[in-house]
Image (cartoon, helix red, strand yellow):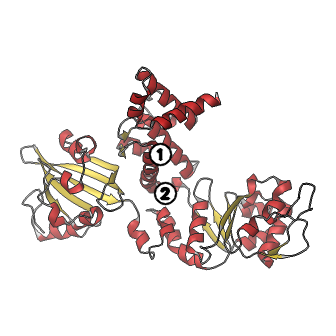
Amino acid sequence: MKRPLDPFPGDDASAFALENVADGVFAVDRDFIVRYFNLAAGEIARVDPADAVGRTCREVFGVTNCRSVCVLRQCMEEARPIANRIVTLKRAGCPNVPVCVSVAPIWATGGMVIGGVQVFRDLSGGGFVSRLAGLQPLDDFGTCDPHLSEIVRMLPQIAQSDSTVLLLGESGTGKEVFARAIHKLSQRSSGPFVAVNCGALPEQLMESELFGYKSGAFTDARRDKPGRFALADSGTLLLDEIGDLPYAMQAKILRALQERSYEPLGGVETLPADVRVIAATNRDLGRMVAEGTFRQDLYYRLNVVVIRIPPLRERPGDVPLLVERVLGRCRMALTKHISSVSPEAMERLMAHDYPGNIRELENIIEYAAILCQGQVIEPCHLPEDLRGAAGGCGVRSGRTMAEVRFLAAREAVERHGGNRNAACRELEISKDTLRRILGRRDADA
């Protein structure tokens, strides 16, 4: 590899250290010509380091709008370091990847900025996932949290057994995502995955919904109807919010788990229950057993393999990765080109407690993406309780997402004197999308 004379010293110790770190490191001069590009940078960006040195970073990374989005350019022009900016690294012929970028200017002896150095870290979790036999379902769990990483590491072994799994975690932590991953990694992956929210089923309909019924079982039962156990045959059944099951129904679930069979409502024939059951709850089942509201025998039947999913407030280091993933979905849904989140906004996001966990974070980023008219989400785009002293962006909080979309669309149309084509260009949405946003809100009024 070519070695620059500056800004890095050419001694063997420095070269060895830079070539053996996991983070990508590269340096440019004042003309943005790459003077150094380490091996990790080449691996993350899918670029040969030898080919990168001597070319502009714009050519190396294939960026067309670097003046407006380049963190390295901003740091050199403002002569100040910038830390922990989350951006998307575009890679020709390969999937794009979220990276955490930190940059700093390089100074000459006289105090002049003569270049800049950038360090970037792959946030996709791909390296960890690829070590697990390339199993795609695990891609959903890119994380830097040690506890969650250990859970993910064990998922393939847990999935290969047919034991009942109990997922514990607060609302919004992604329990169903884990359940789907276990199903996809199991020998039942070719079978159906059926999820039922026990807390959403009316008590009088619960037995027929879970076990089905036979024709004539009650007045309106004109034909047989399969229940969720039958629909999940040879696959996986997720009993979400199992802590909300009525006490009488708990005995029927216990029998189905113990004997692997059940009887439809109004039936006399026992049917086999060839399903793998995964239960999930945000409640303390142990305490419910002590209080007498949850059957002890069912609790022990469920308590075979227990997975506790930590809340987001216990793993703030995962927030930047989750933010980038939500932004990726927002870019497609809103057809916006939001490139990153500013360090100030990210600091507020990482300091938040997230009582609603990942679901709350997703709503926050969607809200910010709707308000953001540029390419970087700033603190003023966040909901009011996260803005701090940043002030507002013209839309007050407390509104639903539909109301925020409607207000943003209506204000854009008004700014352009009723010209909807111009409003669409500003919002970077199609005319059909604008018509749908305005029409749906008017219909709800």
- Residue in view at x 38 percent, y 32 percent: 426
Mark 2 nearby-residue class (10 Å; few <14, some 14–19, many ≥20) = some
Task: Please state which amino acid type lies under the numbered disc 2.
Answer: Arg
Task: Label 1: state its secondary structure.
Answer: helix
Would residue 381 be found to the left or right of residue 64 on screen?
Answer: right
Task: Label 2: state its secondary structure.
Answer: loop
Closest to the observer, 218 or 420: 420
- Quick check: 42 above or below 204? below
Q: Marks 1 and 2, Cα distance to the nearest angstrom?
A: 27 Å
- Identify the residue position indicated by label 2 in the image: 315
- Residue in view at x 11 percent, y 58 percent: 54
Would residue 237 be found to the left or right of residue 124 on screen?
Answer: right
Task: Please state which amino acid type lies under the numbered disc 1.
Answer: Ala
Q: Position of residue 45 (x, y in %)?
A: 27, 61
Residue 333 - label: 1
Rendering quarter of residue 40: bottom left
Q: Is the C-beta separation of discs 1 and 2 under 8 Å?
A: no
Rendering quarter of residue 119: bottom left
- Residue in view at x 41 percent, y 30 percent: 421
Residue 397 seen: no
